[in-house]
Amino acid sequence: MHRSRFQLVPCAVALAATAAVAQVPPIKSGLWQLQTERSVDGRKAPDMNERMKSMSPAARQRMEAMMKQQGVDTSGGGTRLCMTREMLDQGRWHDTSPRCKVDFSTRSASAWKWRSVCTQPDSTGEGEAAFHSPESYTVTSNTTMMLKGQTRTSTNVIKMQWLGAACGDVKPLQLKPKS
């Protein structure tokens, strides 16, 4: 479970960039394309779509179905997600795990910077969301996490590109509201 969670961190990081934020991000609602570059302990890691290619067809189909239920579409060789205006207005465009405390040092129209401390699994991180335009932003983050008694460090660069206002058959991203 922890290993799978660590492997899915890039998606969460793209969305966790602003946990516990009431401020509305300066981006458009609609369909977004996600592109991830990730390294773990200094070694480049394959992106989610590459990892899924190595799965058996049955396992890949189950994973794609589970992700699609959560609002993440990996069909067609890319990763797409839908963010509604309501989600953005309510600050629900990010992972809102109650197990994380996030402190922001900057929240401007062009960049949000933060530090986070999470439990289960224990992790600390820092990152920045750079808003290039309402249709493009990049999240860069560094996370240190304890897994099975070992410290693991991941670096993620997630590039988000707006594809359009209509989400088509991609359902809105399913994130739990912060309690």
Image (cartoon, rainbow, N blue to C red):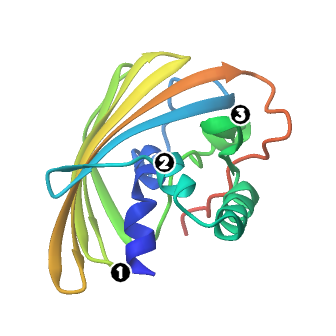
Residue drawn where x is 26% and y is 76% of the image: 122
| Residue behind mark 3 | 85
Cα separation, mark 2 vs mark 1, equals 27 Å
What SS does tag 2 mark? helix
Residue drawn where x is 66% and y is 59% of the image: 67
Judged left or right of residue 170, residue 134 is left
Near-viewer residue (127 or 32): 32
**Looking at the image, can residue 89 be seen?**
no
| Residue behind mark 1 | 120
| Residue behind mark 2 | 50
Cα separation, mark 1 vs mark 3, equals 31 Å
What SS does tag 3 mark? helix
Q: Residue 1 appears at what percent x and percent y?
A: 46, 81
What SS does tag 1 mark? loop
Q: Earlier in the sequence, mark 2 or mark 1?
A: 2
Residue drawn where x is 50% and y is 44% of the image: 22
